[in-house]
């Protein structure tokens, strides 16, 4: 058996509209919104009484998607402060290739985006940085230098 593809990455959020706005500003496209509830949702998550709003955003090339989920029932559980450092076990980040790192960071700031460190240059190949967005989500940005 082989994996066919990675379908999406799921991220639990408390403020769905802020999360959508952040990822749309990044350049993703809102594919749709829906409510998930019922036996299948309970079985998949191992939770009882799931009522969850979801939004699917995708990259412009259509190959990658994020599923944003806002749990109404059972309520969300905080994993601690939203400004955790990058080296916490279980902390994830999603990396995106962008045309212009500095412009992208500037566009994300009004949507809560803050640099985790600073923009770094890797040899003559890439400009790289991590941006913390809504809910403490860490997003990596990579600009390939020509």
Image (cartoon, helix red, strand yellow):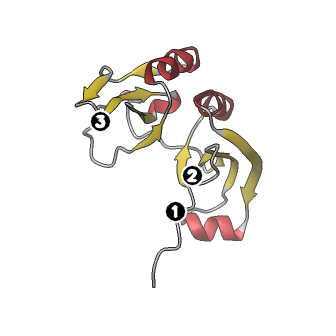
Residue designated by label 3? 86
Q: Residue furthest bottom?
A: 1
SS under mark 2? loop
Determine the residue positioned at 27% across, 26% down: 121
Q: Where the N terminus falls, by quadrant?
A: bottom left
Residue under the point 61% across and 44% down? 59
- The span from disc 2 to disc 3 (Cα, nearest Å) is 22 Å
Q: CA distance from mark 2 to mark 1?
A: 8 Å
| Residue 37 picture location, percent across and down | 73, 59
Residue that mark 1 sits on: 6
Of callouts 2 and 3, which one flags the residue occurring earlier in the amino acid sequence? 2
Q: How many residues crowd around disc 2 within 10 Å: few (fewer than 14), some, or many (20 or more)?
A: some
Please tell me whether mark 2 or mark 3 is closer to you in this view: 2
Left or right, 130 with reference to 75: left
The C terminus is located in which quarter?
top left
Q: Is residue 129 left or right of residue 70?
A: left
Q: Is residue 20 left or right of residue 122?
A: right
Lower sequence index among marks 1 and 3: 1
Viewer-side label of 1, 3: 1
């Amino acid at each position: 058996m082989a994996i066919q593809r990675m379908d999406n990455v799921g991220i639990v959020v408390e403020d769905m509209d802020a999360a959508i706005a952040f990822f749309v500003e990044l350049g993703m496209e809102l594919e749709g919104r829906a409510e998930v509830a019922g036996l299948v949702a309970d079985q998949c998550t191992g939770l009882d009484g799931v009522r969850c709003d979801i939004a699917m955003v995708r990259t412009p090339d259509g190959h990658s998607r994020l599923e944003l989920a806002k749990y109404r029932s059972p309520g969300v559980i905080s994993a601690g402060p939203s400004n955790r450092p990058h080296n916490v076990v279980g902390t994830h980040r999603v990396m995106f290739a962008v045309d212009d790192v500095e412009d992208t960071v500037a566009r994300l700031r009004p949507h809560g985006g803050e640099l985790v460190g600073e923009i770094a240059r890797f040899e003559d190949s890439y400009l790289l940085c991590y941006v913390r967005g809504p809910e403490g989500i860490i997003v990596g940005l990579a600009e390939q230098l020509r």
